[in-house]
Image (tube, rainbow, N blue to C red):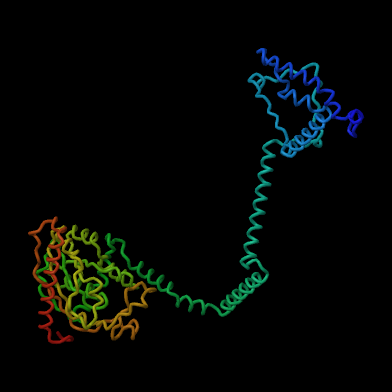
Amino acid sequence: MQRTHNRKSVLGDNPFATAEREAPEATAVRATTRSQASSGTPRAPRRGGTNSKAASAVPPARKTERKAKVEHKAAKAARASIPPAQPAVVEQPAASLAEVHEPAAASPNLPPPEPATDLPAGVESPTQGDVDASDELERKRAVEAKIREIESRIETMSGEGTPRAAEHRERTGAARRAKTDEARSDGGVLDTAREMLSSDYYLRQWGRIGMRNRSDVVDEFGYDPTYDKRVRPILEAMYARYFRATTEGIEHVPSTGRALIVVNHSGTFPYDGVMLKTAVRKEHPAARELRWLSEDQIFYLPFVGSFITRLGSVRACQENAERLLANDNLVAVFPEGAKGAGRLYRDRYRLQRFGRGGFIRLCLRTRTPIVPCVIVGAEESMPLMMRVEYLTGPLGLPYLPITPTFPLLGPLGLLPAPTRWSFSFGPPIELEGYGPESADDNVLVGRLTERVRATMQTMLDRALSARRSVWFG
């Protein structure tokens, strides 16, 4: 045993021998500690926060080796966690006001500063602003290059950037240029024909003619008195000679003040409003001017909307009617609306429903008398045989009328047949017993509307029974 304790290991002295040699000292220390604890003497603080027993029990060589390994691992972990070194930015202390306004005195012990030799002679050092501008320019160039790269990728994915697509575009452009050159070589004949076949040409020509004949003074609704006076002889000739119209009860139309004439729609195309205006102006003793309300669909017809507007027609709505009556105008209204204009020939002279009684509310609010009027003979001049509604979407029309002459004869089919017309005016229907607040009474409005409709249907039946012939009256 003694030889074993004194034998040296490869790393040095035998650790067991050292521990045995140090054991008596450790035993003495533990005995001293117990005696201090029993006697109440305060224990001395531990050095380095380690246990003296463990420290005395570990050999110095092993303790040194373990400490070296721990320090090596800690240094390795610290090197892995440290980020890459950044250039240090040294903040200079702010200069005082005295240092800003007064130059610092040169120290006699310091040598004078030497000029920078990094740049060649005659070249100034770039300022901070130049550096920032250069960096901004570089960033812009980088962004533009990135955008061009993305665009090229998109073109490649969509096929526009491929050589085949470029060849196709070049081939198409060459064919288009060749066709244009061929059309130019043929002279101006094809260009003129192509322009005349386009709808824009006629719209421009019609607009120029219309503006040439338009007067400088028109009212707020577009009525042109100069144009009306110019076409008046034509309308009076159609009234007296073509339709050979007759008028009864014109004395019921007041000579002054406002009044609302309620009329039945008669005929496929809006000739009834123009002829009613001509009849009142020609047959009335005061030659009063009539303004009539037309449906929206009429204003979408080519040339018809502007024509009737310049003659005095107004788009049908409550606001326009109130403004006309407030100026003491004579106003005509067709309460059947589009259903009356689209009535088939087999249902002729059968009044349709008068809507929701809008004209009755208008008369109640404005205290306007109602004059019923019926037109006979117009439905035979352009009988509506059928309506085509599934082909009128691109035209903006509710339906395409089919008559015996239209569209078979084209534009000539719009000319009405020379049947004999008659206009009959009934006694005014006074609403003086009702106040403006009655316009909100739906029951009263419905009852008055039906009363006016029944009166007009009776007048129609009487006029039809008195007529002997469609052509001669």
From this viewpoint, which residue is outermost toward the front? 1
**Percent x, y of residue 38:** 67, 15
Q: Is residue 368 left or right of residue 338?
A: left
Is residue 333 or residue 147 the one in the foreground? 147
Q: In this view, does 89 lie above or below 44?
A: below
Q: Quadrant of the N terminus?
A: top right
Count of marks overlaid on the render: 0
From this viewpoint, which residue is outermost toward the left? 433
Tell me the residue at 20%/78% (across/down): 239
Is residue 66 or residue 399 the one in the foreground? 66
Q: Quadrant of residue 207?
A: bottom left
Q: Quadrant of the C terminus?
A: bottom left
Q: In which quarter of the image is residue 262?
A: bottom left
Tell me the residue at 67%/16% (across/down): 37
Q: In this view, does 69 lie above or below 303?
A: above
**Percent x, y of residue 423:** 15, 76
Q: In this view, does 35 lie above or below 341?
A: above
**Percent x, y of residue 187:** 55, 78
Q: In this view, does 348 lie to the left or right of 227?
A: left
Q: Is residue 236 left or right of residue 200?
A: left
**Percent x, y of residue 415:** 28, 81
Q: Is residue 7 above or below residue 163?
A: above
Tell me the residue at 13%/61% (across/down): 368
